[in-house]
């Protein structure tokens, strides 16, 4: 299969010469990789991938940015509920943190660039951002045209040579069978939380034991790592009614411990670090 090609068009970044060293992974990577805790200074850059025959319409980019703003408002509210605050900068706070690029490979119905492609692009973008602000966390939000399921790629210490620069991928529309259904702010918040160490808690996930997931979901059925749909089972594009459980708040650095779930075996994991594999029951 022919590998896709990307041509950077409007990224306001210096991506050559002086920043070459910034593109290299550190010799001893921080176990939290390029994105740390939710309370630590972090920059997330948005990349909108255009197709040769179909660029992102400006109004669609603006709508997606508005969805991101709703997600960030919710994250800020949840952080304040735990006595913390975000230190997160995105295109919402700084429009310069968004750009377009031309992608010439396949997109649609879940088809898109390879993970290795995204890894290379994230390395390029994050390397430049890290060169500008080496003390801050950096990550990328990729937005693709077409339909597909969102996902996030995070660093796993079991594979030290892979994916140090972390990113989330969003398609314009979801694959849930609804025509022209945008993912919604809850999906954006869910995937962004993965970048900071949050793990899935819905049935069938592979990060925590079934017992732990069921315990947390029973106590917090509207936990965002359990469900991204509203209480009626629909995708809400106007707001969010999800909650952030103490377990997830601890995972992303908002609290000092995972109480009342400190007896779960996963409480031994350091926050902000991807656990790397499923646990035994």
Image (spheres, grey):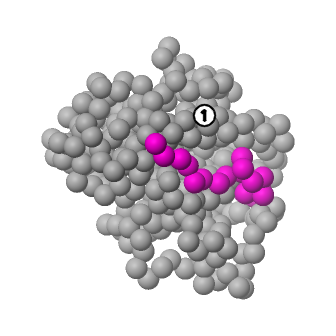
Residue at 77% over, 42% down: 61
Residue at 37% over, 58% down: 273
Magenta stretch encompasses residue 92: yes
Apparent side of residue 204 relative to residue 75 in the rendered image (left or right): left
Q: Is residue 120 visible?
A: no
Q: Residue 112 appears at what percent x and percent y?
A: 60, 50
Q: Is residue 277 visible?
A: yes
Q: In this view, which residue lies farthest toward the top?
A: 232
Q: Residue 68 appears at what percent x and percent y?
A: 65, 40
Q: Nearer the viewer, residue 91 or 166?
A: 91
Q: Quadrant of residue 208?
A: top left
Apparent side of residue 192 relative to residue 45 in the rendered image (left or right): left
Residue at 38% over, 42% down: 248
Quarter of the rendering occupied by the C terminus:
top left
Q: Nearer the viewer, residue 84 or 111?
A: 84
Q: Mark 1 — residue? A: 185
Quarter of the rendering occupied by the N terminus:
bottom right
Q: Quadrant of residue 238?
A: top right
Q: Residue 244 appears at what percent x and percent y?
A: 43, 35
Q: Nearer the viewer, residue 182 or 231?
A: 231
Instruction: Say what secondary structure mark 1 lies in.
Output: helix
Judge the density around disc 1: few (<14), some (14-19), many (≥20) Cα neighbours within 10 Å.
many
Magenta stretch encompasses residue 155: no
Q: Quadrant of residue 155?
A: bottom left
Q: Is residue 52 above or below residue 136?
A: above
Range shown magenta: 83-106
Residue at 72% over, 80% down: 16
Q: Residue 88 appears at what percent x and percent y?
A: 60, 53
């Amino acid at each position: 299969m022919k590998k896709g090609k990307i041509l950077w068009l409007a990224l306001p970044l210096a991506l050559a010469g002086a920043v070459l060293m910034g593109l290299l992974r550190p010799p001893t990577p921080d176990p939290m990789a390029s994105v740390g805790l939710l309370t630590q200074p972090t920059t997330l850059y948005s990349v909108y991938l255009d197709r040769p025959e179909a660029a992102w319409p400006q109004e669609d980019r603006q709508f997606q940015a508005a969805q991101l703003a709703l997600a960030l408002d919710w994250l800020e509210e949840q952080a304040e509920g735990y006595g913390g605050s975000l230190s997160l900068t995105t295109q919402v706070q700084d429009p310069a943190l968004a750009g377009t690029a031309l992608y010439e490979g396949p997109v649609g119905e879940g088809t898109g660039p390879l993970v290795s492609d995204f890894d290379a692009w994230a390395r390029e973008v994050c390397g430049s951002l890290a060169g500008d602000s080496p003390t801050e966390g950096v990550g990328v939000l990729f937005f693709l045209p077409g339909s597909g399921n969102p996902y996030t790629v995070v660093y796993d210490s079991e594979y030290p040579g892979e994916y140090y620069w972390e990113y989330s991928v969003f398609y314009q529309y979801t694959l849930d069978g609804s025509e022209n259904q945008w993912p919604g702010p809850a999906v954006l918040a869910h995937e962004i939380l993965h970048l900071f160490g949050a793990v899935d808690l819905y049935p069938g996930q592979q990060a925590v034991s079934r017992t732990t997931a069921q315990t947390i979901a029973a106590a917090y059925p509207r936990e965002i790592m359990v469900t991204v749909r509203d209480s009626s089972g629909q995708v809400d594009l106007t707001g969010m009614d999800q909650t952030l459980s103490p377990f997830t708040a601890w995972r992303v650095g908002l609290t000092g411990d995972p109480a009342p779930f400190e007896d779960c075996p996963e409480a031994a994991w350091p926050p902000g670090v991807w656990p790397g594999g499923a646990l035994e029951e």
